[in-house]
Amino acid sequence: MVLWRDGSTRVRTHADAVGFAEGAHWGEATVGTNAVGTALVEAAPVQLLAGEHFESAQHGWYCCAQPVHSPVTGELAGIVDISGPALTWHPAVGALVETSVRLAETSLWRLHEQRLERLRRSAEPVLGGTAEPLLVVDDDGWVAMRSGIAAGARVPVPREGRPMAVAGVGLCTPERLGEGWLLRPRERGPMRAELDLTGAAGGAPVVRVHDGDGSWSAALTRRQGQVLALIADAGPDGLDAAALGRGLFGDDGHVVTARAEVSRLRRVVGDLVAPAPYRLADGVHLTVHR
């Protein structure tokens, strides 16, 4: 959907004639191949000139579009597009779009830093009044403050009421704190987990985790279940990406895909799976039911 546009009166009048105005849907399913909709599908820069557009009404146009990705989550946030009469196309247009995207992503990151700073201010009384190790993170898992903990810049996304294993910290229970979460390590015994590859009534795989104070479960895709089972079978030595790729696909040509599969798995189970090499986190005992 077009959210905002600007330009000369003549060009905007031309855009009105083809429906390129605020509130208009400009996806491929609505108007066919065009820079905005195609850049959304491809998640990559797209330039189209004249007859490269699907709709004949757009053949008098050029369009140059590039996606804006959130620097916080990596998700697609929107599109910057410059369009105009085909005969006015200039190579500098592409550079202008790219610069606009960089400015937009920089602004998004600046807003993120401002949110982290607000979270730090709200957390200062909590961290200042205790000597125990604590971690304060935002809703996306970015670390705002740490005390007595050597954690990285980001941890898995906290979830209400779900204990989480954080690398270098151990088992934590997220507690709401203003715009973010307070994570404090908990002293407890080993975490028991079960992976049911058949799921309920032959459905999707399910992982169930029991931590002493309660339990939680999460549905997995069949590929995620396969990855978790291979990691569990590898024992404490774990697997590197090449070995995991061989286990999944039978050859050495899928290292990048194997890394991506682990990344997707960890978004669901958090740091139950430790990286480099891929293995179960310390203190996690997983039973696989095949």
Image: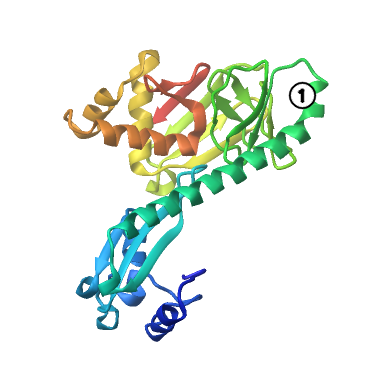
Residue 258 vs residue 66, the one in the foreground: 66
Q: Is residue 86 left or right of residue 23?
A: left
Numbered-mark total: 1
x then y, percent, for residue 138: 63, 38
Neighbor class of circle 1 (other Cα within 10 Å; few <14, some 14-19, many 20+) is some
Residue 164 vs residue 61, the one in the foreground: 61
Q: Which residue does the image show at 69% across and 24% down from the upper left?
A: 184
Hey, which quadrant is residue 259 in on the image? Answer: top left
Q: Amino acid at mark 1?
A: Leu
Residue at the far bottom: name it: 17
Tell me how the rendering is colored.
rainbow
Residue 133 vs residue 250, the one in the foreground: 133
Question: Taking 135 as reference, is 149 above or below it?
Answer: above
Q: Which residue does the image show at 18% across and 28% down from the upper left?
A: 252
x then y, percent, for residue 19: 41, 82
- Residue 46 seen: yes
Q: Is residue 246 left or right of residue 197?
A: left
x then y, percent, for residue 129: 83, 21
At numbered mark 1, what does the secondary structure look like: helix, strand or loop?
helix
Q: Quadrant of the C terminus?
A: top left
Question: Taking 121 as reference, is 47 above or below it?
Answer: below
Question: Taking 3 as reference, is 273 above or below it?
Answer: above
x then y, percent, for residue 12: 44, 79
Residue 188 vs residue 80, the one in the foreground: 80
The residue wearing badge 1 is 127
Hey, which quadrant is residue 237 in on the image? Answer: top left
Q: Which residue does the image show at 54% across and 31% down from the upper left?
A: 154
Q: Which residue does the image show at 36% across and 76% down from the upper left?
A: 30
- Residue 290 seen: no
Hey, which quadrant is residue 145 in on the image? Answer: top right
